[in-house]
Image: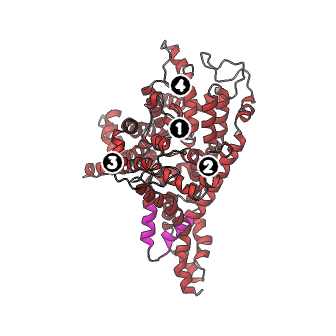
Amino acid sequence: MGGRMPRWQLVLRYVLLLAVLAVTIGPFLWQLSTSLKGPTEDMYSYPPKLLPEHPTLDNYSGVADIIPVWEYALNSLKVAAASVVTNCVGSALAGYALARLRFRGRKLATTAFVMALLVPFESIFIAQFTTMRDLQLNNTLIAVVLPGCIGAMNVLLMRNAFSHLPYEIEEAAVIDGANVWQRFVRIALPSVKGTLAVVAIFSFMGAWDDFLWPLIVLSDPDKYTLTVGLNFLHGTFANNPRLVAAGTIIAVAPLIVMFACLQRYFFRGVGEGAVKG
Amino acid sequence: MSARTHRAASPWLFLLPGLVIIAAFSLYPFISTVGTAFTDARTLTPGHWVGLRNFQDMLDDEQFWTGLRNSTLYVLLVVPCTVLLPLLLALLVQKQVPGIAFFRSSFYTPVVASVVVVALIWVWMLDDRGLVNGILGYFGTGPVEFLSDQWLLLFSAMALTVWKGLGYYMIIYLAALANVPKELHEAAAVDGAGAVRRFISITVPAVRSTMVLVGALSSVAAFKVFTEVYLMAGPTGGPAGEDTTIVMLVQRVGTGLSGRTGYASALSVVIFVVTLVLMLLVLRADRKDGE
């Protein structure tokens, strides 16, 4: 690295960093603060008070009295967990075949996944809705999971990861008489754990944060996922920002914790996804 | 089963789940959308062939033009910000100063949150008596009606989209900047080139292909905008529906018991064509400049 930075430049850098920090994190802290403020506290006071005077968790039980927020969270969790399992299994299997197996039609199969990538969900959701109705799955959590349960993008990510493995590691196993399945499970899969983690995390985040599709396919308020439930809460009780704030914190907290623990996979996913996408 | 057939069948067994899902939930719906676009189907009736009538109806549909206008504005105003601001941010966090990992992670946090969550946070901050207006009031500006004025609503939603994407594109740029040789900057600095000059003549050319990639990704995403505007302006798209985007229009006319499936499918075809054209345009611009 070249010479040291002049002192004024370093100070300027930190001032800018702190300013951006306030803009990116500030809104979350403000929301957290609002969710902890008691009913007697003036939320509109100026200068704004970031620390609640009478901190309380009442808003978290209060929001549960209006919408079944914990059941919605459970629904979101079910959808996200199912999406992680199906995406990991489905895209690892397909990605392995596309990258490591030789067969007629391999190019065609790859093209099918690439073409699926070109069709934006926003241009087919009306047809999806009709399909789900024909399958009599409308208004079920299965219908929420199904369209995104094996993402074409994830298949191509896994294909990419498998194709970077050296051929020698599988050749030895072939000589030892291992069949395709044994090679896949014992040798190839453990070597792409990193990419598999990326697929898992982005599947979870995608399913947990999704809004448009659950909004369309779920009509019964009992079945709502968190995002649809929050929209409902916002529409009905926009007059109490404390409750809405508590609801949003419930929805965002698990992902922030997950991000804090698994940061490098999040960053890695951005890199790999952008290159392929 | 003999070893031979086992061998031939297994690739397709591996591919089966993935192929079934994308065939059933991407490729088939696409074909069916194109087919339905030429019918007068409704939610409960299959409909008949009507030729190009849905597309002709679109030309006379004011809501369609409103939606197209808003989604196009979204692309025109959001994309330049999304291409430029995260690049500046990446330059800011590129240098290894103490605590930089914390700043990088913090800047990425809005990416992790659901659009629904951040939209509700913004709605609360932009409220007539919310945090932003409190701060503006301190400087003597009366409450700005971010959430009831047609244009301010749309601009607020755009700002939200840019804000939420900052960290994501910052990470993409960081990877690209890591490949820019440091010597170039140092040589230019020795020659007396200022920071702005170095940005324009060294950084931008070095990360140009990444800027094009970001432009392609964000323009497609911006045209398809739904959640931000739906939550901030409401399901009916703000005052007199003037903030409706094209995807909101599809959602409104295509769902429900009296949904006009045929017409919504025709609108969907328009969305597909526009996103495809946007992608091709941006990628083509890249090739032209590169020559």
> Which residue carries the number 4 mark?
B126
Circle 1: element type:
helix
* Residue A66 appears left or right of A108: right
Instruction: Give percent across and percent down for residue B288.
Output: 25, 50
Tag 1 subunit: B
Front position in the image: A8 or B275: B275
Give yes or no for contact between labels 4 and 2 (Cβ–Cβ under 8 Å): no
- Tag on residue B282? 3
Front position in the image: A244 or A202: A244
Both marks 2 and 1 on one chain: no
Give yes or no for contact between labels 4 and 3 (Cβ–Cβ under 8 Å): no
Question: CA separation, marks 1 and 3?
Answer: 27 Å
> Which residue carries the number 1 mark?
B107
Q: Nearer the viewer, mark 4 or mark 2?
A: 4
Residue A108 visible, this angle: yes
Question: CA separation, marks 2 and 1?
Answer: 15 Å
The amino acid type found where label 1 is placed reads Phe
> Which residue carries the number 2 mark?
A262
Give yes or no for contact between labels 1 and 3 (Cβ–Cβ under 8 Å): no
Q: Considering the image in quadrants, where does the C terminus of chain A appear? A: bottom left
Determine crowd level at label 4: few under 14, some 14-19, many 20+ residues with C-alpha closer than 10 A.
Answer: many
Instruction: Give percent across and percent down for residue A65.
Output: 74, 34
Front position in the image: B224 or B176: B224
The amino acid type found where label 2 is placed reads Leu
Tag 4 subunit: B
Determine crowd level at label 1: few under 14, some 14-19, many 20+ residues with C-alpha closer than 10 A.
Answer: many
Tell me: residue A50, above or below residue A221: above
Instruction: Give percent across and percent down for residue B155.
Output: 43, 30
